[in-house]
């Protein structure tokens, strides 16, 4: 069989632990046999980040900007325990944080739905896509512990020397203090990415923030969304028969649970971080949630929403069989290849991505799946739990049959 040719390289960012093992198997079993794969490879595994002083992460982010499309494996964000475990020179920053700071943009996370796995929320019939603002707020904050009594103040000094000041709190005891920020330009590109994505998906867009309590910070988000909607998207939304809906985040959360799904839920950075884990778990499994970062200048970074699955990796190191779910990582590859095909006018790549995703879903619907899904399986035939590799091989044989 002739392999599909590529013209532009995909930026490939390798990662850590169990997902690094899955990465290799996905390529060997499901990509390399079918695609004459062209990638520019960056090893974002923690040992190499440490060896390069984290330069490799910056290089990978810049390559993403250069070529437009990347696929990323989950990576460890170091903490004190990892410093010890990997004998690190420094507690390197989260690679996703670094990449998002370079690309800016919005992360869209959507669950992969399976007929025989019912969402925990009974009313949900269609996927809910979370659009997470991937810039600023608590992820770029400055914070410290307050040692004891004293005054905390907020001050802004303009380039022209003008000052704005306010007392935050007169501390009578030790405590904590945090300063966070966002930029109108980033909020505006967040809004535009969400409106554009909603139009593309032909789905309603919901947005919630805490503007009643945060009368400047969150209110600015609400205002910028509304201004951009009125000026640039209202007519297009009406023509497409979809709506934009803003409400308080508390109200949105309640409505999400009562809904039947099928919309985009725009969230500020922290809300999106937390809510995407809740939504993905309620839809079935963290391992069934896809994630793509879309930058305002149309760069795309595809990844799984979950982490490196450390607990499974430690078992794997002890020689135990693991049944880690590779679906979200696999869909990161199919998503990136489809986008590369779209940008380069290679239809065969798009067809391959569609076939790969279909073969994956068909495999699960036939009752063959990894351990995490078995507990939720409601199909007529009993679920057959397989290892990650057996699962990938099952998908491969479906692909080969489909192509034969
Ligand atoms: P995690 O890797 O997402 O795993 C948490 C738990 O969720 C696992 O122990 C497992 O549950 C279940 N799970 C997640 N993905 C699964 C899969 N594909 N198949 C089966 N089960 C899956 O989160 P974590 O353990 O909190 O974090 C581990 C490391 O990942 C950390 O070092 C963190 O920094 C990093 N991380 C990276 C990213 C990223 O690169 N995007 C995101 C989040 C976390 P059971 O153990 O019950 O089976
Ligand atoms: Mg999270």
Image: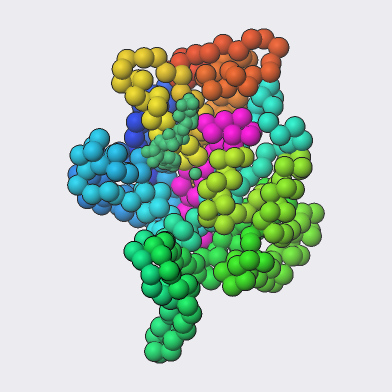
| Count of numbered marks | 0
Residue 203 is left or right of residue 19, and the answer is right
Q: Position of residue 148 (x, y in %)?
A: 36, 66
Which residue appears at 73% of the width and 36% of the height? 124
Quadrant (top left/top right/bottom left/bottom right) for the N terminus? top left
Instruction: Give the quarter of the image for residue 38.
Output: top left
Residue 44 is left or right of residue 305, and the answer is left
Residue 182 is left or right of residue 316, and the answer is right
Q: Position of residue 173 (x, y in %)?
A: 41, 65
Which residue appears at 36% of the width and 48% of the height? 95
Q: Inspect the magenta stretch and tell me whether residue 284 lies in it.
A: yes
Quadrant (top left/top right/bottom left/bottom right) for the C terminus? top right
Which residue appears at 46% of the width and 82% of the height? 165
Residue at the far front: name it: 172
Q: Position of residue 171 (x, y in %)?
A: 43, 69
Q: Which residues are magenta?
A: 280-302
Q: Position of residue 23 (x, y in %)?
A: 39, 30
Which residue appears at 36% of the width and 25% of the height? 313
């Amino acid at each position: 069989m002739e392999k599909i040719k590529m013209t532009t390289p995909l930026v490939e960012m390798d990662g850590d632990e169990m997902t690094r093992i899955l990465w290799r198997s996905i390529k060997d079993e499901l990509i390399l046999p079918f695609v004459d794969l062209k990638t520019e490879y960056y090893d974002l595994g923690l040992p190499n980040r440490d060896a390069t002083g984290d330069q490799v992460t910056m290089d990978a982010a810049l390559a993403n900007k250069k070529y437009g499309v990347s696929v990323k494996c989950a990576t460890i964000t170091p903490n004190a325990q990892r410093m010890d475990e990997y004998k690190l020179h420094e507690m390197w920053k989260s690679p996703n944080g670094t990449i998002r700071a370079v690309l800016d943009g919005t992360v869209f996370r959507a669950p992969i739905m399976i007929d025989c796995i019912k969402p925990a929320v009974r009313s949900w019939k269609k996927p809910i896509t979370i659009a997470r603002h991937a810039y600023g707020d608590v992820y770029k904050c400055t914070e410290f512990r307050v040692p004891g009594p004293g005054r905390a103040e907020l001050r802004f000094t303009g380039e022209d020397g003008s000052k704005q000041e306010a007392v935050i709190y007169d501390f009578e005891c030790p405590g904590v203090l945090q300063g966070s920020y966002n930029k109108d330009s980033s909020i505006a590109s967040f809004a535009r990415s969400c409106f554009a994505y909603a139009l593309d998906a032909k789905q309603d867009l919901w947005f919630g923030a805490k503007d009643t309590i945060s009368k400047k910070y969150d209110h600015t988000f609400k205002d910028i969304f509304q201004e951009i909607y009125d000026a640039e998207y209202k007519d297009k939304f009406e023509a497409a028969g979809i709506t934009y809906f803003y409400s308080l985040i508390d109200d949105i959360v309640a409505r999400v649970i009562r809904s039947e799904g099928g919309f985009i839920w725009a969230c500020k950075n922290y809300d999106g971080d937390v809510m995407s884990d809740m939504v993905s778990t309620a839809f079935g499994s963290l391992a069934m949630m896809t994630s793509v970062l879309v930058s305002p200048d149309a760069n795309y970074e595809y990844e799984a929403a979950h982490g490196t699955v450390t607990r499974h990796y430690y078992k794997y190191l002890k020689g135990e069989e693991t049944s880690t779910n590779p679906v979200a990582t696999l869909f990161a590859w199919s998503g990136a290849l489809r986008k590369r095909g779209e940008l380069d006018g290679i239809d065969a790549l798009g067809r391959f991505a569609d076939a790969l995703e279909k073969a994956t879903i068909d495999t699960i619907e036939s009752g063959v799946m990894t351990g995490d899904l078995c507990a939720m399986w409601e199909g007529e035939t009993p679920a057959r739990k397989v290892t990650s590799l057996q699962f990938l091989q099952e998908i491969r044989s479906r692909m080969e049959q489909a192509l034969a």
